[in-house]
Structures are given as structure tokens and as C-alpha cells.
Image (cartoon, rainbow, N blue to C red):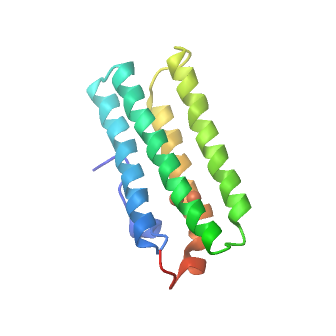
């Protein structure tokens, strides 16, 4: 069993976004695997950077479609994305300064960070995007 297992309840009913969410889950699972395997700070930071990079790409994709279809909650959603990125960057700074080590606590934070966004904020666009060509 992986650290986060994809579940149908995570589906936002937009195939491409489900796929991107699965990729994000896969990167968090890689971090978990790295922690268990005793990866060093350099390897872990490399994976965390990939998570940040992919997250930005995914968020931009969602925002592009929301904007294109005039999604009414676009501004709030965009703000939520900005906050999420800022939260992980804060963690990254603490890791790099040696103030904090990679831990299960960090992994639990990332799990909550992603799953809460998918189940809460992202889920809200499911109905809106239904039948649209994304
Ligand atoms: Fe989102
Ligand atoms: Fe998303």
C-alpha cells in the first residue's frame, strides 16, 4: 500500500485533472518512499522541487480553464493555489536551512495539503466543468 492511494472519491470528474492529481500523489509517494529508504537532504529536496514544479504546472492548467470558461470562483481558487504553493515553499526553506528535517509530519502535511484541496476547492468545479471540452 502506498502512502496515498488514489481513490474514486478524489475524482473531480475531469479526466485530465484527475490524471494530474494522480501524478501529484505519485510524487508525494516518492517522498514517502525516500524517507523510508533514508534518502539524503539533496535527493529529498530534488523530489520536493519536482512536486513544486508539477504543482505550479497543474495549478496553471486549472486556472487557464477556469478563466477561459469564466468560472465564478476563479479568484478564490487562484488565491487558494497561491497559499498552497507558499505553504510548501515555507517548508522547503526550513528544510534547506536545517531548521527542520524531513519527517512523517511533513509527509502528513503534504497529504492533507493535497487531499483537502482536491476534496474541497477542486471538487467545487466538477459540476461547472461537466460537459465542457477540457
Ligand atoms: Fe485547484
Ligand atoms: Fe487540482
- In the picture shown, does residue 54 fall above or below 104? below
Q: Residue furthest bottom?
A: 131
Taking the image as shown, residue 19 lies to the left or right of residue 109, namely: left
Residue 22 visible in the displayed image: yes
Q: How many marks?
A: 0
At which x and y percent is residue 32?
A: 36, 37
Q: Quadrant of ligand 1?
A: bottom right
Q: Residue furthest front?
A: 68
Which residue corresponds to the image point at 55% horizontal and 78% vertical from the top-left? 129
User: Can you tell which quarter of the image residue 50 is in?
Assistant: top left
User: Can you tell which quarter of the image residue 11 is in?
Assistant: bottom left
Taking the image as shown, residue 123 lies to the left or right of residue 47, namely: right
At which x and y percent is residue 27?
A: 37, 44
At which x and y percent is residue 118?
A: 53, 60
At which x and y percent is residue 124?
A: 62, 70
Between 12 and 36, the one nearer to me in the picture:
12
Residue 115 visible in the displayed image: no
Which residue corresponds to the image point at 55% horizontal and 15% vertical from the top-left? 97
Which residue corresponds to the image point at 45% horizontal and 28% vertical from the top-left? 103
Q: Residue furthest top?
A: 98
Which residue corresponds to the image point at 38% horizontal and 34% vertical from the top-left? 47
Amino acid at each position: 500500500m502506498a502512502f496515498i492511494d488514489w481513490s474514486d472519491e478524489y475524482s473531480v470528474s475531469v479526466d485530465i485533472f484527475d490524471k494530474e492529481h494522480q501524478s501529484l500523489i505519485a510524487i508525494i509517494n516518492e517522498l514517502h518512499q525516500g524517507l523510508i529508504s533514508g534518502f539524503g537532504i539533496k535527493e529529498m529536496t530534488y523530489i520536493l522541487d519536482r512536486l513544486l514544479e508539477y504543482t505550479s504546472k497543474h495549478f496553471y492548467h486549472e486556472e487557464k480553464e477556469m478563466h477561459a470558461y469564466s468560472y465564478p470562483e476563479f479568484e478564490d481558487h487562484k488565491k487558494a493555489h497561491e497559499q498552497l504553493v507558499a505553504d510548501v515553499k515555507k517548508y522547503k526553506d526550513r528544510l534547506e536551512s536545517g531548521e527542520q528535517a524531513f519527517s512523517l509530519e511533513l509527509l502528513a502535511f503534504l497529504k492533507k495539503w493535497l487531499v483537502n484541496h482536491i476534496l474541497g476547492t477542486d471538487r467545487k468545479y466538477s459540476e461547472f466543468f461537466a460537459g465542457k471540452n477540457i
